[in-house]
Image (tube, rainbow, N blue to C red):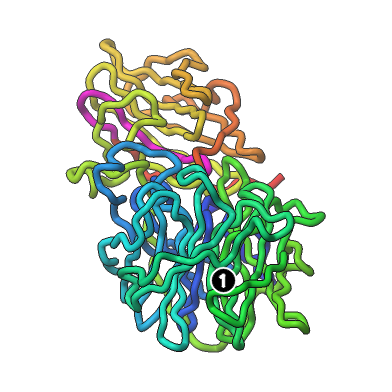
Amino acid sequence: MTGPWIADTGDGHYRNPILYADWSDPDAVRVGDDFYLTASSFNRVPGLPLLHSNDLVSWRLIGHALDRLVPEDAYRTPRHGCGVWAPALRHHDGRFWIVYPDPDHGIYVTTSDDPTGKWTEPRLILPGKGLIDPCPLWDDDGNAYLVHGWAKSRCGFNNRLTAHRMTADLTRPLDDGTVIVDGDAIPGCRTLEGPKWYQRDGWYWIFAPAGGVTNGWQYAMRSRHVLGPYEPRVVLAQGDTTVNGPHQGAWVQTPAGESWFLHFQDLGAYGRVAHLQPMTWDADGWPVIGDHGTPVTRHRKPALTSATARVHDQVPEWTRPANPAPARSGAGTRRLPCEPGDDLRAFPAVLGRRLPGPRFRAETTVDLDAPAGARAGVTVLGHAYAWIGLEQHPDGPRLTHRNAEAGGEAERDVSEPVPVDGPVRLAVTVTDGAVARFAADTGTGWKEHGPPFTATPGLWIGATLGLFATGPDGHADFEPLLITALEES
């Protein structure tokens, strides 16, 4: 990804995380000399992002598989923590397949012959509450299977993996499902979820995380039979490193025959950032990930073949927290219509993007053409939020800076509103610890407004850097958001 964090160190090595932004629950596949990755998107629209890489280190966002969340009516307003949970990405029979869960509705499948093109409308293949983290497997004998986990928040239990025989096109199950791994029977195992299913040298493998998002670990499980029993082993854990909860990801093999493992680390307001670990195999045929089972912070890049890999264009990253009205679906980032709204956490039209790195500055200019009561600006949005921008009053616009604390607290001014005449330049600077500082230039130079604001995550996602316009009528015009890197501390 372009932005303030570059993982490639330029000397044949890379540093972790390879993606210093909220690309949660990554899954990846190789097709020829190209690598493709998708991630959880929860209530963000569009959903199911698709990233491309030639080397597993540098990635570009090339599209989304899900234009709108379904069921359509359920996502007209933000439903934080709902929507698209951990998906699986596969390439089979000449097509790309994404199987993804909505914990309140069931498991869906969508396919495409081109990851940058049109994806099929998502089809519900396993309805029900609490079904999460699915992954398909097409066996060598022609049979197809699907494994998934369970969300205790929806169905009252978790810590087990259930598998179904499926039709080859994954349109429906052929049985009622079988528990193939019971986490309660594994000493110390809790919150077993996120299975990814593979075959290698006569073994069936399930890679699955446990222990929870913040402080969990990664299992590899193997069996000679597709439905088990599976023998588990912890293959990645924090150890004495600073990488908490290293788990939930993808095993990928390069054209040169190397194995690599992608996983995430939860960094609060920065979200679940993606790491890349080397992976080898021991004498007993078990995977060895990272540095003998602990994460590496720096390593040589994957060995590549001499083939020329495909290059994709990068697409804009902007998303919204709910399905936009049909008339707004194609709205850009230059002009935002004012829409009714008060608390930005419940506002369905925040135009947002992930925090793009640990230290950065984002600048834009806003011009508000709207009646009294309208407002527009830049926000850092999570359980708590802060914004700076313009609010329209009967006597003209005022530069306004407000915060809203977590817990649903109402906004309050944190600096004195300033009457202005015309457009205003705005800036947000984020430094270590996701500490945000807001500034504005009304024509006399930059001035910082209000105290520092420590960003907070949303529900299952990191904080959002966003643009917004609220009010009974009118619109706000923004210049393109310019993001630059700050020197690392």
**In screen coordinates, is 136 left or right of 320?**
right
The magenta span reads 460-476
The residue lying at 62 percent from left, 78 percent from top is 223
Q: Considering the numbered disc 1 on the image, is that residue within a helix, a strand or a loop?
A: loop
Residue at point 47% right, 81% down? 309
Report whether 459 appears left or right of 230. left
For the point 64% across and 71% down, the residue is: 221
In magenta stretch: residue 249: no
Q: Position of residue 276 (x, y in %)?
A: 63, 66
Q: Amino acid type of disc 1? A: Leu
Q: Quadrant of residue 333?
A: top left
Residue at image coords 41%, 82%: 143
Left or right: residue 226 versus residue 443 is right
Residue 395 image point, x, y percent: 28, 11
- Can you say whether 367 is above or below 188 in the image? above
Q: Is residue 274 above or below residue 154?
A: below
Q: Which residue carries the number 1 mark?
A: 56
Say whether residue 466 is magenta.
Answer: yes
Image coords of residue 49 (percent x, y)? 41, 59
Residue 450, visible in the rendered structure: yes
